[in-house]
Image (spheres, helix red, strand yellow):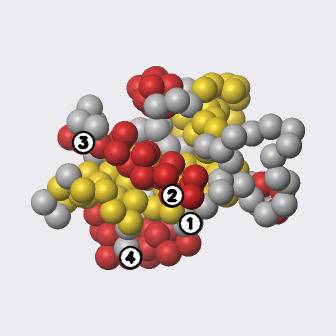
Amino acid sequence: MIVRPATPRDATGISAVLNPVIRDTTISFKPIELSLDEVAKLIENAPGIFVAEDDGVILGYASYDQFRRGLGYARTMEHSIILAPEARGRGTGRALMQRVEDHARAAGIGSLWAGVSGENPEGVAFHARIGFETVVVLPKVGFKFGRWLDLTMMQKWLQPMGDDAESSA
């Protein structure tokens, strides 16, 4: 398995991993599958997006982008990670997240956030194992398949943070 930066030619492989999660689960709150063009735009616009690949097959991807818009949030990112079922429990998620964290840290990002569905306890446990801490559970903020869903917000600091941290970008 290799982890590498995604390119627009990976849109088909990423779609094959992502769209079943959108269509069939509450891991993602997205209600509509993404087209190949939409996935290609995500690849082009994300500051960091990486794929795990084995023998030319995409096993998963991880990306990050700004948490909220505006200069005040420029050093805070939210990430996404989706794995194919056959990639789970094989170190694929850890390898992808290490690449995301290294890339974000090198870019001066202060922290990464994960928004994990309340119906995805495996996702919460995974993030806890790699150093994310639960900050808050937002009750009933998502809606999919006719029901309200909680969102667990988890954070991992990437840079030393203190009152004397440089405040300018």
Look at mark 3 in the image and give the residue it sits on: 87
Measure the C-alpha gap from mark 2 to mark 3. Answer: 22 Å
Q: Which of marks 4 and 1 is in front?
A: 1
Question: Which residue is at the front of the view, 52 or 21?
Answer: 52
Q: Is mark 4 on a helix, strand or loop?
A: helix
Pick the residue in front: 30 or 134.
134
Sooner in the amino-acid sequence: mark 4 or mark 3: 4
Residue kind at label 3, given as amino acid type: Ala
Circle 3 SS class: helix
Tag 2 secondary structure: helix
Residue at the (60%, 26%) spot, across then down: 133
| Residue 135 placement, left or right of 82 | right
Write down the residue under mark 2. Answer: 103
Q: Are marks 3 and 1 in contact (CB under 8 Å)?
A: no
Please identify the quadrant where the C terminus is shown.
bottom right
**In the displayed structure image, the side of residue 94 where residue 77 appears, left or right:** right
Q: Residue furthest front?
A: 164
4 vs 2, front mark: 2
